[in-house]
Image: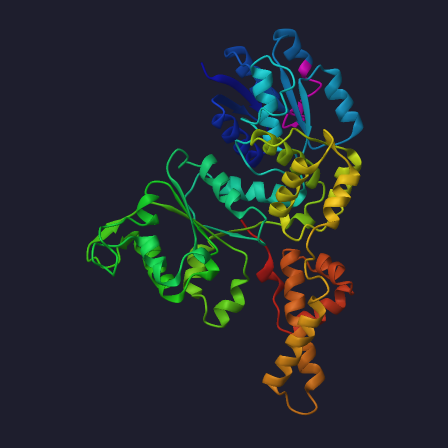
C-alpha cells in the first residue's frame, strides 16, 4: 500500500517540489494551504505523516496542532518554517514534532524524514541512501533555493531549458532532477556531451545514420534523438557544438523531426531538450561561433547554477553526503569532525562540487581514523595541484597587450579605449553574478553605485539584460 502524506503549505512552488519528491518515494500526497483545509482532510482521510508550514493563510500551524494531537495522537508531524529563530525551533520541539526543518531546507533530508515517520522508524542508518539519493541536488543556501524554484516552474511543462554554470557545478544533476520530477519521469533520459564527440561524428551521434552513409556505416543506427523519444535529451557543453551541427539541431527543434545522416526519410521525435554550457555564449554569438537563433530556441528558461564558492553553508552537507556515497561504493565508513568541516568550508573549490566530491573520496580512502579530522584535511589540501592562481595576472596583461597590438587605437585615445575594453567585460561579469542588481554589483566591484551607473551609461550596458526571470 502506498504511504499517505498530508502537506499543509501555502507556497505553491515549495508545495510542488515536495509533492513531486514524495510521490517519487511512493507517497500519495494530499495538499492544502490552510488550517481549515487541513482539518477537513484529516476528518475525511487517514494519513501516515503530516508536513505543515507554521505561517498559514488562516493562523499559526504550531498553535493549531493541539487539535491535531487530540484527534490524531499517533500521527507523526514534520514542521517546516521560514521563521528560523530559536523560539520557533523550541515551539516545534514542544509539540512533539517528529522533525523540524527551517527553510530553506535540504529536500533529500525532508524526504528521508517523511519516509521514516510514515514507516514508524527512527533515525536512519547513515549508509541507507535510497531516499537521500532520489534527488541528487543538495544544498540549503539561498542561491540553490533559487535553482530549486526555477526547477519547480518547468516540471509541468516541456519548455526548453538552458543550464548555465561553471564546470563541476552539477549541470547534469539539474537536468536529471527536471526529468525525474517532471511529467516524463520513467521515460528515457539520454545525455550527450558535445565536447566529447569528434566533429565529424556529432551529427551521426545526434541524428543517427543509414547504412552506407559513410565509410564504416555497415548498418542503420539510431541517434540520441530517437533513443530519447518520449523522454529527455540532455545536450551538455552545447557551446562546443560545431556550426554545421548547430544548423541541423535548430531545424530539428523547429520542426520536431530529424533526418538520419545519409537518409531521405524524416522521423518525428518527441523529446524534451535540456542544454547546458560552461561558456559565455554572448561573445560567441558576436563572433559568429554560435547561432543566435539557436541560442534563443534553447534559452527559453535559463537556469543559472551557482559555483560552490557562492553557496555558503552547502559544503558541509555536501561533504557528508559524499562520504555516505563513498561508503556505499565500498570505501571505508568515515565521519567528519567539525574542525575539518570548517576547513573544507573555507576553501575556494575552483573545481566546484566535482572537486569536493573527489577530495572526500580520497579522504575516505586515506584517512587512518574513522573520523576525518582537520589534520588529514590539511595534509590532503597541501598535496593538491596548484590551480594556476599566480598565472592569471600575467595572462590578463598578455591579453591586453595583444589587444593593443591588434586594435591600434588612434593617438590620444589609448587610455580611454583600453579602459573601456577592460571595464565592459568586468562590469558585465559583476551584473551576471548579481542578476542585474546594481547595488550588489557595485558592492562586488568595490565602487560607488553612482559611479557604476555612470559607467554603465557610458559603456552602453543595459543592466536589465542581466536580470534572471523565470
Q: Is residue 247 left or right of residue 431?
A: left
Q: Is residue 116 above or below residue 183?
A: above
- Is residue 60 located in the magenta-colored stretch of the structure? yes
x and y percentages locating residue 42 in the rendered image: 55, 13
| x and y percentages locating residue 269 in the rendered image | 29, 47
Image: 17 above or below 265: above
Q: In the rendered structure, which segment of residues is drawn in magenta?
A: 53-65
Residue nearest the observer in this picture, 21 or 261: 261
The residue at 72%/29% (across/down) is 370
Nearest the viewer among 233 and 452 is: 233
Q: How many marks?
A: 0
Residue sitting at 56 percent across and 46 percent down? Answer: 170
Residue 37 spot, x, y in % from top left:
56, 20
Front one among 442 and 70 = 442
Left or right, 342 with reference to 279: right
Q: Is residue 284 visible?
A: yes
326 is within the stretch colored magenta: no
**Residue 34 in sight in this render:** no
Residue 120 position, x and y percent, is 59, 12
Q: Is residue 191 above or below residue 185?
A: below
Amino acid at each position: 500500500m502506498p504511504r499517505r502524506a498530508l502537506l499543509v503549505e501555502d507556497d505553491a512552488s515549495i508545495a510542488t517540489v515536495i509533492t513531486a519528491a514524495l510521490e517519487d518515494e511512493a507517497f500519495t500526497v494530499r495538499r492544502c494551504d490552510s488550517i481549515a483545509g487541513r482539518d477537513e482532510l484529516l476528518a475525511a482521510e487517514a494519513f501516515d505523516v503530516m508536513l505543515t508550514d507554521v505561517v498559514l493563510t488562516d493562523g499559526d500551524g504550531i498553535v493549531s496542532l493541539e487539535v491535531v494531537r487530540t484527534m490524531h495522537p499517533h500521527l507523526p508531524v514534520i514542521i517546516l518554517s521560514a521563521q528560523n529563530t530559536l523560539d520557533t525551533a523550541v515551539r516545534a520541539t514542544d509539540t512533539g514534532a517528529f522533525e523540524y526543518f527551517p527553510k530553506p531546507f535540504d529536500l533529500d533530508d525532508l524526504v528521508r524524514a517523511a519516509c521514516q515517520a510514515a514507516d514508524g522508524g527512527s533515525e536512519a542508518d547513515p549508509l541507507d541512501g535510497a531516499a537521500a539519493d532520489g534527488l541528487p541536488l543538495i544544498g540549503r543556501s539561498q542561491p540553490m533555493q533559487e535553482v530549486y524554484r526555477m526547477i519547480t516552474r518547468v516540471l509541468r511543462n516541456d519548455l526548453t531549458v538552458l543550464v548555465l554554470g561553471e564546470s563541476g557545478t552539477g549541470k547534469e544533476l539539474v537536468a536529471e532532477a527536471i526529468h525525474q520530477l517532471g511529467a516524463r519521469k520513467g521515460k528515457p533520459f539520454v545525455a550527450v556531451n558535445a565536447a566529447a564527440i569528434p566533429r565529424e561524428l556529432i551529427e551521426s551521434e545526434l541524428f543517427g545514420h543509414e547504412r552506407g552513409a559513410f565509410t564504416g556505416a555497415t548498418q542503420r543506427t539510431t541517434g540520441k534523438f530517437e533513443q530519447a523519444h518520449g523522454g529527455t535529451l540532455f545536450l551538455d557543453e552545447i557551446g562546443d557544438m560545431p556550426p554545421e551541427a548547430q544548423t541541423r539541431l535548430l531545424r530539428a527543434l523547429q520542426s520536431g523531426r530529424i533526418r538520419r545522416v545519409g537518409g531521405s526519410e524524416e522521423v518525428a521525435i518527441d523529446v524534451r531538450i535540456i542544454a547546458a554550457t560552461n561558456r559565455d555564449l554572448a561573445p560567441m554569438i558576436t563572433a559568429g561561433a554560435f547561432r543566435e537563433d539557436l541560442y534563443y530556441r534553447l534559452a527559453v528558461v535559463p537556469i543559472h547554477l551557482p559555483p560552490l564558492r557562492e553557496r555558503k553553508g552547502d559544503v558541509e552537507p555536501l561533504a557528508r553526503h559524499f562520504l555516505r556515497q563513498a561508503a556505499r561504493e565500498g570505501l571505508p565508513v568515515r565521519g567528519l569532525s567539525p574542525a575539518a568541516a570548517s576547513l573544507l568550508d573555507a576553501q575556494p573549490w575552483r573545481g566546484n562540487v566535482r572537486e569536493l566530491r573527489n577530495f572526500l573520496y580520497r579522504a575516505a580512502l586515506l584517512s587512518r581514523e574513522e573520523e576525518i579530522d582537520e589534520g588529514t584535511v590539511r595534509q590532503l589540501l597541501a598535496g593538491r595541484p596548484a590551480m594556476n592562481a599566480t598565472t592569471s595576472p600575467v595572462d590578463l596583461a598578455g591579453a591586453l597587450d595583444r589587444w593593443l597590438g591588434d586594435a591600434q587605437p588612434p593617438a590620444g585615445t589609448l587610455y580611454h579605449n583600453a579602459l573601456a575594453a577592460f571595464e565592459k567585460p568586468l562590469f558585465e561579469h559583476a551584473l551576471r553574478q548579481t542578476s542585474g542588481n546594481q547595488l550588489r554589483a557595485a558592492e562586488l566591484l568595490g565602487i560607488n553605485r553612482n559611479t557604476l551607473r555612470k559607467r554603465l551609461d557610458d559603456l552602453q550596458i543595459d543592466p536589465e539584460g542581466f536580470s534572471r526571470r523565470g
